[in-house]
Image (cartoon, rainbow, N blue to C red):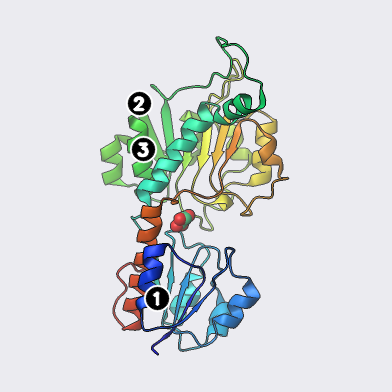
Amino acid sequence: MGFKVLVTRIIPPKAQARLLEQNFELVQWDQDSSIPRNVLLEKVKGVDALFCLLTEKIDDELLDAAGPQLKVIATMSVGYDHIDVAAVKARNIKLGYTPDVLTDATADLTVLLALGASRRIKESIRAAENGAWGKWGPTWLCGSQFTHKTCGIVGLGRIGEAVGHRLKAFGISRFVYSGRSKKPEAEASLNAEFVPFDELLQQSDLVVICCALTKDTQNMFNYEAFSKMKNTVLIYETPLQVLVNSARGGIVHQDDLVRALEDDLIGAVGLDVTTPEPLPPSHKLYSFPNCLILPHVGSATMETRENMANMTLENILAGLSDKPLPYSI
Ligand code: DGY
């Protein structure tokens, strides 16, 4: 029996089969729910490697519970705001993640949310299913379209850029972006303009959030920010400007978003991420017809999830053999 490895969920089938072929002393949480914290703290004791998901908080408490033999932690996610990176690095533990591979799937879903919110898909599906579908009407369930509109991308990284290219095909004529630093290559490929955050809010018909959750971006979309968004003129209840978040729930101040929707500051919203996750069905946000919410499925294609699991396994194997991780944070 080789190294002791904790895997916090059953992973997609091909990667799971590959995992089972390894000469590991495998400890795996096999239930269809995330591993409870107390169980995680117990099971992590004495492991050499930890294969985790974004549902597990990796902090000093967990690292203490694991013990000094822990060589590598690999998360099956591109986001790593659930990990105290400094604490992991301070213990010389190798740390891996899954960049690039989920860019297309997440960008597709971001565009789906943008289209769905601006074309009033939630109301349309409900109307079709609950009998509210009457005769065809000239203005009934009219949304707005992207042709000749401005899109603001907050965080022009891999996913932001991929979202931009997709939206170009839907007629967006101008891109602005904001973020920590300029991105010359992505900027050139989209003909985008780097602008201060406030300007992005004021100019964009569609705002997409594609940045990482950090202490700087936490709650950056608060009531003040919503108040600066391009003024909505409600014609036939048409959502004229749209906000989409497929990054992390914590970037949006959710109570402020509820207020902003109540005060008609935003035309329509599409969210794939919330705080908390899962968002309880009783949450006020679900009650807005112009707020479309999905359960964090941005990367949820079998192709992408298999790739993510495989990359995570590659990171674990490299870490256990004291090699540099192929996908290292
Ligand atoms: C990630 O990987 O960070 C996504 O949010 C889920 O795939």
For label 1, being within 8 Å of ligand 1 is answered no
- For the residue carrying disc 1, how many other residues have a C-alpha within 10 Å: few (<14), some (14-19), or many (20+)? few
> Residues under labels 3 and 2: Cα distance?
11 Å
- Residue at the spot x=37%, y=66% of the render? 15
For marks 1 and 2 on the same chain, the one whose residue lies earlier in the sequence = 1
Q: Is residue 42 visible?
A: yes
- Residue at the spot x=38%, y=73% of the render? 19
Q: Secondary structure at mark 1?
A: helix
Residue topped by disc 2: 173
The answer to whether residue 4 is above or below residue 84 is below
Frontmost of labels 1 and 3 is 1
In depth, the one of 166 and 282 nearer the eye is: 282
In depth, the one of 79 and 320 nearer the eye is: 320
Looking at the picture, how far across and down is residue 286, in whole percent? 67, 39
Instruction: Tell me if label 1 and label 3 are in contact, CB under 8 Å.
Output: no
Q: Quadrant of the N terminus?
A: bottom left
Q: Disc 1 marks which amino acid?
A: Leu
Residue topped by disc 3: 164
Q: Secondary structure at mark 2?
A: loop
For marks 3 and 2 on the same chain, the one whose residue lies earlier in the sequence = 3
Residue topped by disc 1: 20
Image check: 3 left or right of 9?
left
